[in-house]
């Protein structure tokens, strides 16, 4: 008898497999990221123990049989859809932001490595992405995912000389994607590899930015977020992720659409 396991899950990747089946990547709360085969999930029959084919970004309760070894696919035995996230599907910027959040997760989290805290952050993020808090939420999630994966970026002080960022309005500093932190603008604090120049105020804001669960639990801020500053902030966090994996994120091209501005306008000259 196989052992059936259950867990709360978010569907982060779906690929069709044969006429009737799918291969999915589910991010589960207590079993981590699971690659599973959903046999017959696309078949319309009474025997189908799933609520229809699985859709990207939906939440549900999964019943599965774990793979014998981590190189194989587990088997999805049941899927009880709890939230179809319709508010994301009717608004393209929200959907694109959710696709980026899913991509960040599958890029940073290793299969079978549980991250219940990040699961909670992703649930909060998917909720916030359907609200006006969307731009802030996706930036907060990129930071939370890096932190959960053990690569918390450092924005509180220069990596070399430990000087905190200047609060002068037009102060600039550099971010090293490879080292994952800020550096003074001058060459006395040398960087490993290429750096990105950014306003010091963005580093200060990124340092203070709370996790999505905290954003969700607090009243929305009175001041609307500055989309150009948030786009720059997300660009920096994604550059850090790409430097860790040595390849561009598949969803990076969606970046400008979620803030409604072109990336070129987001950078200081
Ligand atoms: Zn320095």
Image (tube, grey):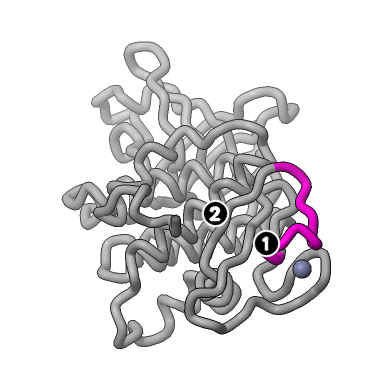
Q: List x then y, in percent, for residue 196.
A: 58, 52
Quarter of the image that includes the N terminus:
top right
Residue labelled with disc 1 = 153
The magenta segment: 184-193
> Most prominent secondary structure in the magenta stretch?
loop
Image mark for residue 236 = 2
Image mark for residue 58 = none
Farthest residue to the top: give it. 18
Whether residue 58 is visible: no
Front-most of residues 113 and 97: 97
Whether residue 37 is visible: yes
Quarter of the image that includes the C terminus:
bottom left
140 in the magenta segment: no
| Quarter of the figure with residue 160 | bottom right
State which image quarter holds ligand 1: bottom right
Q: How far separated are the C-alphas under marks 1 and 2?
A: 10 Å
């Amino acid at each position: 008898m196989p052992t059936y396991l259950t867990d709360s899950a978010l569907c982060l990747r779906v690929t069709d497999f044969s006429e009737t089946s799918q291969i999915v990547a589910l991010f589960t709360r207590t079993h981590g990221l699971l690659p599973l085969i959903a046999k017959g999930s696309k078949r319309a029959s009474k025997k189908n123990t799933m609520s229809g084919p699985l859709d990207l970004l939906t939440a549900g309760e999964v019943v599965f049989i774990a793979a014998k070894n981590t190189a194989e696919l587990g088997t999805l035995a049941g899927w009880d859809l709890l939230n179809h996230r319709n508010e994301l599907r009717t608004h393209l910027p929200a959907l694109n932001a959710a696709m980026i959040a899913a991509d960040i997760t599958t890029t940073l989290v290793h299969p079978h490595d549980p991250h219940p805290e990040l699961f909670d952050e992703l649930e909060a993020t998917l909720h916030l992405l359907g609200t006006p808090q969307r731009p802030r939420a996706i930036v907060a999630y990129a930071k939370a995912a890096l932190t959960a994966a053990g690569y918390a970026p450092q924005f509180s002080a220069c990596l070399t000389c430990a000087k905190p960022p200047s609060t002068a309005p037009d102060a600039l500093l550099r971010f090293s994607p490879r080292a994952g932190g800020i550096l003074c603008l001058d060459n006395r604090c040398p960087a490993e590899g290429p750096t990105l120049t950014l306003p010091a105020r963005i580093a200060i804001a990124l340092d203070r930015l709370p996790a999505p669960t905290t954003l969700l639990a607090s009243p929305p801020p009175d001041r609307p977020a500055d989309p150009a500053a948030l786009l720059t902030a997300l660009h920096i966090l994604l550059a850090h992720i790409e430097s860790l994996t040595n390849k561009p994120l598949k969803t990076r091209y969606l970046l400008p659409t979620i803030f409604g501005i072109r990336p070129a306008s987001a950078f200081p000259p």
